Image (cartoon, rainbow, N blue to C red):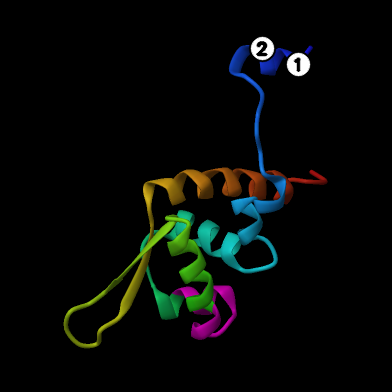
Amino acid sequence: MGTLVDEIIGPMTMDYGNLKAGRLEATHAIKILIILYFEGKMIKGVLASYVAKGTVSVQSRVDELLQLDLVTEEQEQQRPFRKFIELTPKGRAVAEHLAAIEELLQGEGR
């Protein structure tokens, strides 16, 4: 006999060894999502200064977030050819939850 959840929606088949959320840990990807949530569309170089890592490091994180369809990257068609990073609707939904968690953690001890 399964749990009540199993009875309502069926058994969950979660591949814990391949969690996509795991790609966000141990990197600055979570920080990038939260910054974009609060700041909105940003120039990649400015985003790098917020993250306190180099542009190359931020590009690696952005590439991971692009693969997860959490951000978009758009380059200007004329000089200075800046690249802008922005949350996708899916990215905004994820970042909203991460921001709420951050606010809870910031409020600890109050």
Quadrant including the C terminus? top right
Residue 86, percent across and down?
37, 61
Q: Under tag 2, what secondary structure?
A: helix
Q: Are marks 1 and 2 in contact (CB under 8 Å)?
A: yes
Amino acid under disc 1: Thr
Q: Nearer the viewer, residue 19 or 41?
A: 19
Question: Which residue is depicted at the point 45% across and 55% down?
Answer: 70
Is residue 49 rendered magenta in the image? yes
For the residue carrying disc 1, how many other residues have a C-alpha within 10 Å: few (<14), some (14-19), or many (20+)?
Answer: few
Is residue 90 rendered magenta in the image? no
Q: Which residues are magenta?
A: 47-57
Amino acid under disc 2: Glu
Q: With 29 as the anchor, is 14 left or right in this view?
A: right
Question: Which residue is depicted at the point 44% across and 77% down?
Answer: 46
Residue 79, percent across and down?
20, 87
State the residue position of label 1. Answer: 3
Q: Residue furthest left?
A: 78
> Whole-Å distance between the Cαs marked 1 and 2?
6 Å
Q: Is residue 80 above or below residue 73?
A: below
Residue 84, percent across and down?
33, 71
Question: Which residue is depicted at the point 71% across and 46% down?
Answer: 16
Majority secondary structure of the magenta segment? helix
Residue 96, percent across and down?
52, 45
When asked about the image quadrant of residue 87, the answer is: bottom left
State the residue position of label 2. Answer: 7
Q: With 17 as the anchor, is 72 left or right in this view?
A: left
Q: Is residue 77 above or below residue 96?
A: below
Q: Is residue 15 above or below residue 11?
A: below
Q: Residue furthest bottom?
A: 79
Q: Under tag 1, what secondary structure?
A: loop
